[in-house]
Amino acid sequence: MSTHFSDLKGKVVIVTGAAGGLGSKCALELARNGVKLGLFDMHPDIEKTAMEIKSERGMENNVLYKKGDVCSLDNDRSFTDSVYRAFGRMDGLLNIAAIYRGLKHTSLFDLTEKEWDNTMAVNVKGSWLMSKAVAPFMMKNKKGKIINISSTTVLSGTPQIMHYITSKAAVVGLTRAMARELGGDNIQVNCVSPGILPTEASLERLPDAYMEKLASESSLKRITPPEGVISTLEFLLSDASDYITGQTIVVDSGRYFL
Ligand SMILES: NC(=O)c1ccc[n+]([C@@H]2O[C@H](COP(=O)([O-])OP(=O)(O)OC[C@H]3O[C@@H](n4cnc5c(N)ncnc54)[C@H](O)[C@@H]3O)[C@@H](O)[C@H]2O)c1
């Protein structure tokens, strides 16, 4: 599935969590739609994503990348500054980076303070810090789109991952608060809440039978591919969504309704 939002061509978007999974697929799709990208992830594979994009015709100068931690952005604006300097504008931010792959399944009694703090730091603080680094460029231009990623586990309350669920619920609150604060500068802040996606991170921990059960429980009787989320992200990055802000959109083939 490939989407075409023609007004995305020439826009500049920062994508965090772009070393693999949803983030890398999304980066590639945006690049193919003519978007210039700043890619950020703490995993070394961020270089692989950037090289894959650069290897496509006409895209060699359309991507900057940096290996870094979203939690340390308050001290280091060099990445966002360099993206703005290189491309001359800043249109969008996709806060996709999160503690998800290898997420520890544990009861509330066995969950350690370190696991709790780290999950909250990356999933919540990281999205705030990256937004804080990017928003001033959008404010200058009186236009911008910030999109955060929550999860339908917030709606299901799936046991044994309360640190993750709590962090993804906080992302919904962060989205609403930033929408109010930045709306006067014509910056839309929205959130996408995917159900289980068949990314490497999910497939390595969830058995096929569980995936089939989720599909059968959804209205559309299928698992949502990453492309289903990516097309929603593209819509929220595009001018077509200029009157939508503070919202959380569930993309899960209709298993949960908000
Ligand atoms: N895959 C699913 O089923 C699913 C469902 C709902 C929501 N989500 C959310 O979608 C997003 C992508 O999911 P995915 O399956 O691709 O997961 P993933 O774990 O493969 O991707 C997360 C990325 O974030 C990066 N990251 C982690 N900590 C970081 C840090 N401190 N600084 C910078 N980068 C960091 C990782 O290196 C990784 O590349 C996540 O926000 C996840 O919570 C996923």
Image (tube, grey):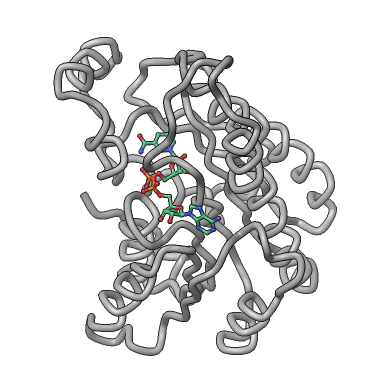
Q: Quadrant of residue 194?
A: top left
Q: Residue 29's spot in the image, x, y percent?
A: 32, 62
**In this picture, is 110 found above or below 51?**
above
Q: Is residue 243 visible?
A: no
Q: Residue 138's spot in the image, x, y percent?
A: 72, 67
**In this picture, is 112 found above or below 78?**
above
Foreground residue among 34 and 102: 102
Residue located at (66% from left, 45% from top): 121
Left/right of residue 166 with respect to residue 180 in the rendered view: left
Left/right of residue 211 with respect to residue 158 in the rendered view: left
Q: How many dots with numbers? A: 0
Quadrant holding the C terminus: top right
**In this picture, is 51 found above or below 146?**
below
**In this picture, is 236 found above or below 25?**
above
Left/right of residue 194 with respect to residue 114 in the rendered view: left
Left/right of residue 113 with respect to residue 151 in the rendered view: right
Q: Residue 203's spot in the image, x, y percent?
A: 23, 36
Residue located at (62% from left, 56% from top): 145
Residue located at (54% from left, 66% from top): 14
Q: Is residue 136 visible?
A: yes
Q: Residue 30's spot in the image, x, y percent?
A: 38, 64
Foreground residue among 43 and 56: 43
